[in-house]
Amino acid sequence: MFFALHFVGAVVFAVLCVLIFTFSAVAQPWPITILITMVGTALGYYFPELWISQEIKKRQLEIRKAMPDALDLLTICVEAGLGFDAAMSNVAEKWENELSMAFARGIREIQLGKVRREALKNMAERIDLAEMTSFVAAVIQSEQLGVSMAKVLRIQADQMRMRRRQYAEELAHQAPVKMLLPMVGFIFPSIFIVLLTPAALTIMRTPIFGGSG
């Protein structure tokens, strides 16, 4: 279905371009019409890729924000005596977000007979997030070495919280750069018009430019 959307998008964008140029008030030469239609077809073909990339980034951002709190809840459940699988099930039942859905799918795979290590690796591959990969690697290593799971989860929760803060600071540092283009394109021209228009009118009224004085 996803690959079919490429061709559907290409056809839709091509038809829209043809209709726009056909019923346009200003007639355009056929070479320009064909060129813009080809560009529109290419955009329509790659539009599903752009859409799914944005959805992936949105899902990863939601998971990144939820991971510290989820690991805190996992730590509390494990320290209270629950097993790791039961703690993941508890997180999946308490919340309704992308992370809880990922946990629920991992638990279902374990219940269907898949080894926990493989189920966790598959979950990390589906999410494709550095924080999740690090968390899964730490859990698998703690099982292999016999380290306390609660201690590992608490350390991971602290690290996830620090990474979330660093990511927020990184976005804050990018804000001035992202604001530069709208300011140059919309705000600065308005300021120039307000400041320079009186001066231009004054200059045009001078006798040098044939004004009335």
Image: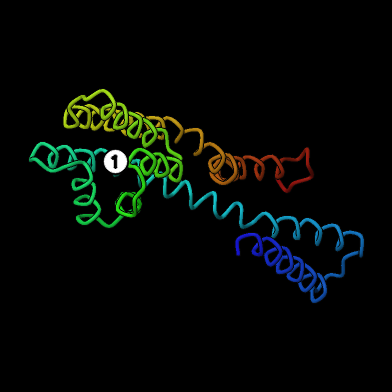
Establish if 139 lies above or below 209: above
- The residue shown at (23%, 45%) is 85
Residue 11 in the image: state x and y as whole percent: 74, 68
* Drawn side of residue 138 relative to residue 14, left or right: left
Q: Considering the image in quadrants, where does the C terminus appear?
A: top right
| Residue extending furthest toward the left | 80
The structure residue drawn at horizontal position 79% and vertical position 76%, both measured from the top left corner, is 23
x 65%, y 60%: residue = 3
- Using the image as rendered, state which of residue 19 and residue 77 is in the foreground: 77
Q: Secondary structure at mark 1?
A: helix
- Residue 93 at x, y percent in the picture: 21, 57
Q: Quadrant of the N terminus?
A: bottom right
**In this view of the protein, can residue 98 be seen by the observer?**
no
Front-lying residue, 86 or 19: 86
Q: Position of residue 171 (x, y in %)?
A: 41, 35
Q: Is residue 62 above or below residue 177?
A: below
- Is 185 displayed left or right of 156 in the figure? right
Q: Is 24 situated above or below 193?
A: below
The residue lying at 66 percent from left, 45 percent from top is 201
Residue placed under numbered mark 1 in the picture: 67
Picture coordinates of residue 165, whole percent (x, y): 31, 31
Dividing the picture into quadrants, the one containing residue 61 is: top left
What is the three-letter code of the residue carrying label 1? Met
Q: Residues within 10 Å of mark 1 (few under 14, many from 20)?
A: many
User: In which image quadrant can residue 147 be found?
Assistant: top left
Q: Residue furthest front?
A: 113
